[in-house]
Image (cartoon, grey):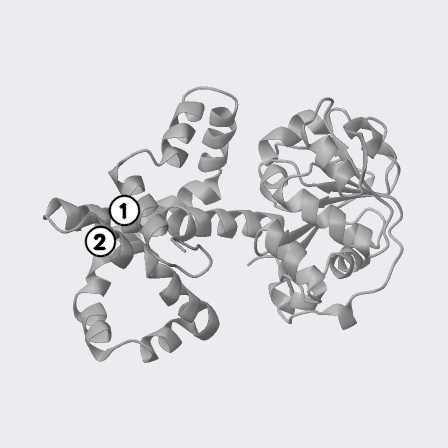
Amino acid sequence: MSKGNEQREVLFEKDCPAMNLGRVIVLGLGNQGRAHALNLRDSGVEVHVALREGSESAESARNEGLTVCRIAEAAEADVVVWAIPDESMPDAAGTLVGIKDGQLWLFLHGMSVTWGWIDPPKNADVVLLAPQGPGTALRELYQGGGGLPAVLAVETDYTGSAKERLLAYARLVGCARGGLLWSSFREETVVDHFGEQAVLCGGVPALVRAAWETLVEAGHDPHLAYIECLMQLKLLTDLMYSSGVSGMRRRISQTALYGAATEGEGVIGEETKELLKNLLNRLESGGFAKHWLAASRGGEWPRERKRLVGGGDSFGDAGRWVRKNLHWPGIGGKK
């Protein structure tokens, strides 16, 4: 059972103290780092962004009114927000010598702590706030008066007030407006990676491409196949997002519903479920984390990454044609 399962109630702003957290330093200005820094600033917090020497992000940070400092300066902060990639954290941690006693180390993802890539100091509170969406959504929702839900965890409570400080931080960045759930570093890590790999970033794109290839190899038009297998996916996921799977099914045609039940559900069978179990085992055992850390430091990953994001093939060509020549919500097309 994961930490926090005994208190699965959802917390909101009313449950979070309004505290002065002191000087906050956000490590990194990536997707999440930028959003956290700007939201904290707009909430009246003294916040700096720590970047490596010569970082191309420094000018961007200053243009948005943020103060830039060196990573080593984070040792003197009251709160350090770890917004750099997990695989970069061990090197960054090595520069934080003699940290301020009682410092709050706040992580946005549990991976580096869960698998021991980083060894937080014994005289610091170690907590987790994992927004359930990208930094762009965190920022946009905050600016609109809303908030992005987040998962919380306390790994080390050195000061005795780690929980209160974490809740106060969640209030400052807006996540408390969306809702907060307690978990643990390990559970957040495993569930997050499983969702990414099995569904969001791995399973769904692979299924879409396999379906498209099946139609095209059978002689069907690649553009129509792309529209059916990918472009219409947003309409259905939007329905599932707003109304759940059963709500989506109530809104589709009887033909689509009957076909989904008699034919479509068979695409995901026992073999797939066994593969999902094997994937979960690799995540829970730390096998994936070990392989990713090694890959991130060289080897074949740069070439593999280029292949994955390149899109220079017939599938990518079909997508570019569809987006260019037809009008799609939020995309445009010919005017």
Question: The N terminus lies in which quarter of the figure?
Answer: bottom right
Residue 81, image quadrant: top right
Residue toward you, 202 or 57: 57
Relative to residue 165, is residue 312 drawn left or right? left
Q: Residue 127's x, y, as percent?
A: 72, 49
Q: Amino acid at mark 2?
A: Ala
In the image, farthest residue toward the left: 218
Residue toward you, 76 or 191: 76
Q: Residue at x 64, y 39 (%)?
A: 30
Residue 288, image quadrant: top left
Residue toward you, 6 or 90: 90
Relative to residue 78, is residue 71 drawn left or right? left
Q: Residue 148's x, y, as percent?
A: 63, 61
Q: Amino acid at mark 1?
A: Arg
The residue that label 1 is drawn on is 209
| Mark with earlier residue (1, 2) | 1
Q: Is residue 68 above or below residue 259?
A: above
Relative to residue 166, is residue 272 drawn left or right? left
Residue 99, image quadrant: top right
Residue depth check, mark 1 versus mark 2: number of the one nearer the observer: 2
Q: Residue 51's x, y, as percent?
A: 73, 30
Distance from Cα at disc 1 to Cα at disc 2: 10 Å
Q: Residue at x 88, y 36 (%)?
A: 100
The residue that label 2 is drawn on is 225
Residue toward you, 210 or 223: 223
Residue 127 visible in the picture: no
- Please say if the residues under marks 1 and 2 sit with CB atoms less than 8 Å apart: no
